[in-house]
Image (cartoon, rainbow, N blue to C red):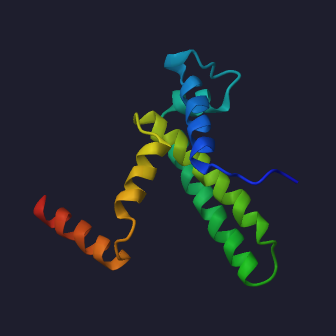
């Protein structure tokens, strides 16, 4: 078994640093690093993985819902999804910290209120 995570943001910060160190521009070797390879191949490569992992989260949740799969598989698939999303963030010069800041900004807002605000912003940009 593993130790409980006491500081999730620290885990995300460390993973962000590892991903950043694997960027080809930082010396990451696409021949020996999965992350460097994805980043070198560009958005089509890592966005395909984001889509695949999102579908696997859905399938794991559906399996767990119907009793034919272990609920723990959802955790594993979400970890894969988050990882590939973090690779995408790194490619675009963003990090998990940016996502955490956005979540903090939304904290305490009704989901319906947040959605309405986003809709109003999108309409004002048209």
**Against 78, is 35 above or below?**
above
Residue sitting at 68 percent across and 51 percent down? 6
Nearest to the observer: residue 4 or residue 113: 4
- Expressed as whole percent of the image width and height from the top left, the position of residue 10 reads 60, 42
Q: Quadrant of residue 28?
A: top right
Is 106 situated left or right of 91 in this image? left
Q: Of all residues shown, which one is farthest toward the top?
A: 27
- Expressed as whole percent of the image width and height from the top left, the position of residue 18 reads 61, 30
Nearest to the observer: residue 55 or residue 8: 8
- Expressed as whole percent of the image width and height from the top left, the position of residue 68 reads 82, 79
**On-image quarter of the N terminus:** bottom right
Q: Quadrant of residue 62?
A: bottom right
Nearest to the observer: residue 116 or residue 100: 100
Is residue 8 visible from the viewing direction of this image? yes
**Against 114, is 19 above or below?**
above
Q: Of all residues shown, which one is farthest toward the front?
A: 6
Residue sitting at 46 percent across and 44 percent down? 97
Is 78 situated left or right of 121 in this image? right
- Expressed as whole percent of the image width and height from the top left, the position of residue 38 reads 58, 34
Q: Quadrant of residue 16?
A: top right
Nearest to the observer: residue 2 or residue 82: 2
Is 119 situated left or right of 90 in this image? left
Residue sitting at 17 percent across and 69 percent down? 120
Q: Of all residues shown, which one is farthest toward the bottom?
A: 66
**On-image quarter of the C terminus:** bottom left
Residue sitting at 64 percent across and 59 percent down? 78
Is 68 situated left or right of 21 in this image? right
């Amino acid at each position: 078994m593993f130790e409980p995570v006491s500081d999730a943001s620290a885990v995300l910060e460390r993973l962000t640093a590892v991903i950043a160190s694997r960027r080809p521009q930082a010396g990451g070797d696409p021949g020996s690093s999965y992350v460097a390879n994805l980043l070198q191949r560009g958005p089509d490569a890592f966005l395909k993985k984001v889509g695949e992992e999102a579908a696997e989260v859905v399938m794991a949740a559906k399996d767990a819902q119907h009793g034919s799969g272990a609920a723990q598989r959802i955790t594993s698939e979400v970890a894969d999804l988050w990882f590939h999303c973090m690779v995408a963030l790194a490619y675009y010069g963003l990090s998990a910290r940016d996502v955490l800041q956005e979540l903090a900004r939304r904290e305490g807002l009704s989901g319906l209120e947040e959605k309405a605000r986003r809709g109003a912003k999108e309409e004002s940009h048209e």
